[in-house]
Image (tube, helix red, strand yellow):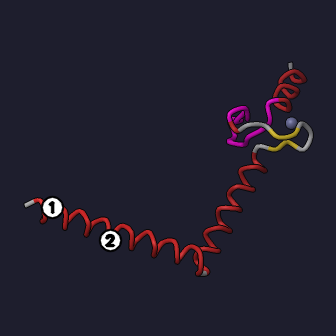
Amino acid sequence: MIAIIMEGVLFVALVAAGGALLYFVITTYTPVGRRLREVRNRKLIEQEADTHCPIHGTFREEEMVRLPSGDRVCPQCFKETVWQTR
Ligand SMILES: [Zn+2]
């Protein structure tokens, strides 16, 4: 009974190891992996650009202010805008 269970566990481990190896080979040595890395880099740069103000510098994502229109603005610019309109 234990031998059958161990055989099943080892078979599942073999399938998982084979899947991990296949994923590693595909993402490392094929154009698909390069495309995935490029998409990841683009998203990272877009995220950095969203949290960067050309006047006040870079803020954390939690510090950014979302306007009712959906746009995001840096907290310093938002404070200056609020203070000027009041
Ligand atoms: Zn700003």
Name the residue rendered at 68%, 42% in the picture. Answer: 70
Q: Nearer the viewer, mark 2 or mark 1?
A: 1
Q: Which residues are magenta?
A: 62-75
In the displayed structure, 54 sits above or below 46; it is above
Q: CA distance from mark 2 to mark 1?
A: 15 Å
Name the residue rendered at 70%, 38% in the picture. Answer: 61
Name the residue rendered at 87%, 23% in the picture. Answer: 85
What number is the disc on residue 5? 1
Q: Quadrant of the N terminus?
A: bottom left
Q: Quadrant of the C terminus?
A: top right
Q: Is residue 64 magenta?
A: yes
Name the residue rendered at 87%, 21% in the picture. Answer: 83
Q: Nearer the viewer, residue 67 or 65?
A: 65
Q: Write down the residue under mark 2.
A: 15
Report the side of 71 relative to 53 (left or right).
left
Q: Amino acid at mark 2?
A: Val
Mark 2 packing: few (<14 Cα in 10 Å), some, or many (20+)?
few
Queried on whether the Cβ of the residue with tag 1 lies below 8 angstroms from ligand 1, the answer reads no
Q: Earlier in the sequence, mark 2 or mark 1?
A: 1
Mark 1 packing: few (<14 Cα in 10 Å), some, or many (20+)?
few
**Image location of residue 53, percent across then percent down:** 85, 42
**Image location of residue 21, percent across then percent down:** 46, 73
Which image quadrant for residue 39?
bottom right
Report the side of 10 relative to 21 (left or right).
left
Q: Amino acid at mark 1?
A: Ile
